[in-house]
Amino acid sequence: MTEANWPLFEVFIRSRGGMSHRHVGSLHAVDAEMALQNARDVYTRRGEGLSIWVVPSGAIKASDPGDKDMLFEPANSKIYRHPTFYEVPEDVGNM
Amino acid sequence: MYTQGLNTHETQGTSPVDTEREARFQARIDADEKIEPNDWMPAAYRRTLVRQISQHAHSEIVGMLPEGNWITRAPTLRRKAALLAKVQDEGGHGLYLYAAAETLDVTREELVEQLLTGKAKYSSIFNYPTLTWADIGAIGWLVDGAAIMNQIPLCRCSFGPYARAMIRICKEESFHQRQGYEIISTLARGTPEQKAMAQDALDRWWWPSLMMFGPSDKESQHSDTSMRWKIKRFSNDDLRQKFIDATVPQGHALGLVFPDAQLKWNEETKNFDFGPIDWEEFRQVVSGNGPCSRDRMRTRRKAHAEGAWVREAALAHAAKRRSRDAAAKLAAE
Ligand SMILES: [Fe+2]
Ligand SMILES: [Fe+2]
Ligand SMILES: [Fe+2]
């Protein structure tokens, strides 16, 4: 096959007002404009969205799953970052 | 984002078996964790998924042909709009699934080529012809019905992108089955000629629909490891039985007769007993000798070849626009 391949785009959709855009999948298109059109046809046939973002897949830098522990483990021991860590006298009520 | 960079390329068979990593992988699966594209996975797991997901994608795409055959001849505007929407959904399903397969380090072009050269298989059911309008009803009711049985457990598949694609697909499938059943029931309650059409469609589609679940558990080669890897959750025979038990009452409710003299409710097992499946027919259809096999492949190849200039022109147009924009930017500076 000598044909050049179409680039890959990641598709993000805002499903309702007030929500953030969420990754829904990917598709191929020659440019961002076509990616938007295709995303509309492929991912919003039943009113799933109010807004679409498309991003060239190559533009996304992902963390390496192998670094998972190094990156995210340290947060587990820092329980003082959560409100439940602190004691408030009962008669003070909700805080 | 899934197809690039972080994946370790594994060539088939040459990678040494890493028992320690494999044990850790299996432990993750056993703990019902999802495997994501950039996670380490055994080469065989990757291969199995590429094969299964791409076959599934090919089936959705080829599956558009038998139904597309009736879009221009749908009896009413309502039926036509529904059929058009259904076939469009199937095209979308193909795309979700190709995208899921592509996260495993294969390109769309490789997958399409495998289909067009006959290297990859697709569901046997789409090699049967749609002779009458009633066949469109039978496909929605039986073929989509069988597909749903198969696909619901796949929503919990261990591979994240496949499971997520299946959730989308299953949401869309239920309308497919209902519109098919509506067509069949309208015919079954119509004139004697219409009822005969519905019966004829059931006669022709029933056995091929049962074959959709694949070979009997006694002969299926991939089942054991697929179960261990939680790619598959139920055996072929279990799913087939579930489908029969759900579908037979739906047919009886319309006064239709299933083309199986041995089909009978078994009070003991609480299942329908059924007659033997013609596995020779299944083997023939799978190996490319179904009634429409050659026609389907010819149609796909023709569409791909005749679309080549569109794909090339779109790329060229995008390149031209990019360079024009760049030139305009330069001039403005
Ligand atoms: Fe389907
Ligand atoms: Fe589908
Ligand atoms: Fe469907």
Image (cartoon, coloured by chain):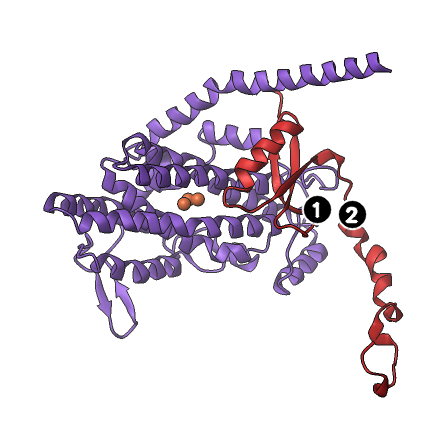
Chain colours: A red, B purple
Foreground of the two, B176 or B239: B176
Mark 1: few/some/many CA within 10 Å (<14, 14-19, 20+) = many
- Extreme left residue here? B192
Residue B191 image position (x, y, % from top left): 12, 46
Chain of the residue under the numbered disc 2 shown in the image: A
The residue that mark 2 highlights is: A64
Could you tell me which secondary element the residue under label 1 belongs to?
A: loop
Could you tell me which secondary element the residue under label 2 belongs to?
A: loop
Q: Is residue B38 left or right of residue B209?
A: right
- Extreme bottom residue here? A91
Q: Quadrant of residue B267?
A: bottom left
Q: Is residue B209 left or right of residue A95?
A: left
The answer to whether residue B319 is seen in the rendering is yes
The answer to whether residue B13 is seen in the rendering is no
Report if the CB atoms under discs 1 and 2 are less than 8 Å apart.
yes
Disc marking residue B330 = none
Disc marking residue B38 = 1
The amino acid marked with disc number 1 is Asn
